[in-house]
Amino acid sequence: MTLFRCALLLLAVVAALGTTGESQAIAWVIAAATATSLVQSVLFHRRLSQLIHPEWDDGSQEPNSTDRFDRLSRSIQTIRGKLKRRVERLAAERDRLGVLLEGMAEGVISLDALGKINASNHAGRALFETNGDGSGLSLIEVLRVPELHETAQRALRGQAGETEFESTDGRNLLARIHPLKQGGAVVVILDLTEVRRLERVRKDFVANVEHELRTPVAVIQSSSEVLVTHGSLSGKALELAEAIHRHAERLGLLITSLLELSRLESGKHEIELVPTNLHAVIERSLLLCRDQIDAKGVMLHNTCDPSLKIVSDDQALEQILVNLIDNALKYGGQSIWIGTQSRGQNIELSIEDDGQGIEARHHARLFERFYRVDSGRHRKRGGSGLGLAIVKHLCQAMKGTIRYEERQPHGSRFVLALKPAKQEEKSSVLGP
Ligand code: ADP
């Protein structure tokens, strides 16, 4: 081909030199076109060689055309081998994913861009109200749940969503639908029947505790109080009446905490997030703890900025603070510090004491329900081990966080991070 182009170029040049007028012009055009095509062909060939054999670049061992052909053919063989291995790897990967998908307990249904089913796993097909694998059918044809259909339509338009529904056999199912970048969507269906059953058990338990335990404990509390304060008992009898009263009080507190925690965990606790004057809530909480503070003779240092506004629920924040101050009184030393500082997007409120602090091995579990640092001193101070679990739930409900830090040289620091109130919200702030 290259030889043919060279001959054509030569002919065109000779013709151009040997003619005049229009024929000469035509001959020069042909010569120019042939020369351009010749140069392009050479460059293309060179580039191809560089790509396949970069080692030829140094020109030290430029092979002849037979060598080149051999090498080109060997390269094509190598590329073919590589491609084959890649295809095999992809096929193995596809098989592995297929087995994984089929083995999943959650139902998975894939929809194409038109909302038609193009794949599903065993758990997904088991939910279908029709026979077969549903291929080519729309979701509403295999699962007649209008809310599910609507969520799927929204997902096909790019908006992920979820919907809970009841299957024909009475199971509680949750469908999560995610849009795919290339069009279509994937539906993942979880069986929540057991979760919902446990929620009902918990609700019944809370109702039962409320009726069956709270009332008798309240009667024991008040009766033992009468026995203790009436003055008619003395000696061993009075001692026993006092013990009954003390334990009834503890049991009463435990029941209240348990019910509170149960309500929080079930998400039934109502939280109203409004701009709040932090200083005012701290003052109210301190007032509630005043008797214990005075009885213990603890020094209080409150450095909170009186004008600070945060977004919180007054009641919940007060409950958190009373819990943390109460702990600082129970487990701390002779001083309590309450302070605030802004960090990043948050306002951090810290409650510190100069007690013996908490060993590092307990930090991770501190906010778990019933977790108590098992030191003899702490156990003697009563408590249920539910206080910090309630504090954590209340913080989360207010979209805040709480963490524990060691205080130097000794003591504990609990840090509560909450969002500051925005400027425009300040006008509606409650408090002084
Ligand atoms: P409790 O009702 O036992 O006080 P909490 O959930 O409030 O339950 O606290 C869990 C445990 O964490 C407590 O038993 C105590 O050992 C430890 N703790 C809490 N606050 C402090 C503190 N300020 N200093 C030292 N230990 C603390």
Image (cartoon, rainbow, N blue to C red):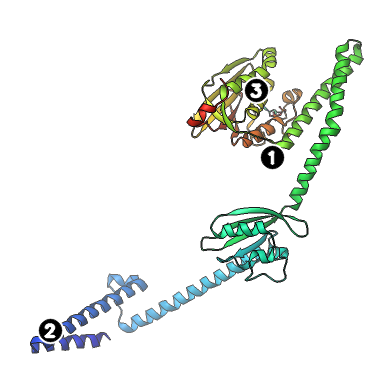
Task: State the SS at label 2.
Answer: helix
Few, some or many C-alpha atoms within 10 Å of disc 1 (few <14, some 14-19, many ≥20)?
A: few
In this rendering, would 57 be left or right of 428?
left
Q: Which mark is residue 325?
A: 3
**Which residue shows up at 48% across the image and 73% down it?**
82
- Looking at this view, is 45 or 376 the one in front? 45
Query: Picture quarter containing residue 75?
Result: bottom left
Tag 2: amino acid: Ala
In the rendered image of this protein, does residue 232 appear above or below residue 153? above
Q: Identify residue for label 1.
A: 267
For discs 2 and 1, the disc positioned in front in the rendered view: 1
Q: Which mark is residue 25?
A: 2
| Of callouts 3 and 2, the N-terminal one | 2
In this rendering, would 380 be left or right of 116?
right
| Of callouts 2 and 1, the N-terminal one | 2
**Which residue shows up at 57% across the image and 58% down it?**
155
For the residues labelled 2 and 1, the Cα–Cα distance comes to: 91 Å
Asked if the beta carbon under badge 2 is closer than 8 A to the nearest atom of ligand 1, the reply is no
For the residues labelled 3 and 2, the Cα–Cα distance comes to: 103 Å
For the residues labelled 1 and 3, the Cα–Cα distance comes to: 25 Å
| Of callouts 1 and 3, the N-terminal one | 1
Q: Position of residue 411 (x, y in %)?
A: 61, 23
In this rendering, would 103 be left or right of 228?
left
For discs 3 and 2, the disc positioned in front in the rendered view: 2
In the rendered image of this protein, does residue 253 appear above or below residue 151? above
Q: Quadrant of the C terminus?
A: top right
In the rendered image of this protein, does residue 342 appear above or below residue 164? above
Q: Position of residue 205 (x, y in %)?
A: 81, 39
Whether residue 34 is visible:
yes
Q: Which mark is residue 346?
A: none
- Looking at this view, is 411 or 189 the one in front? 189
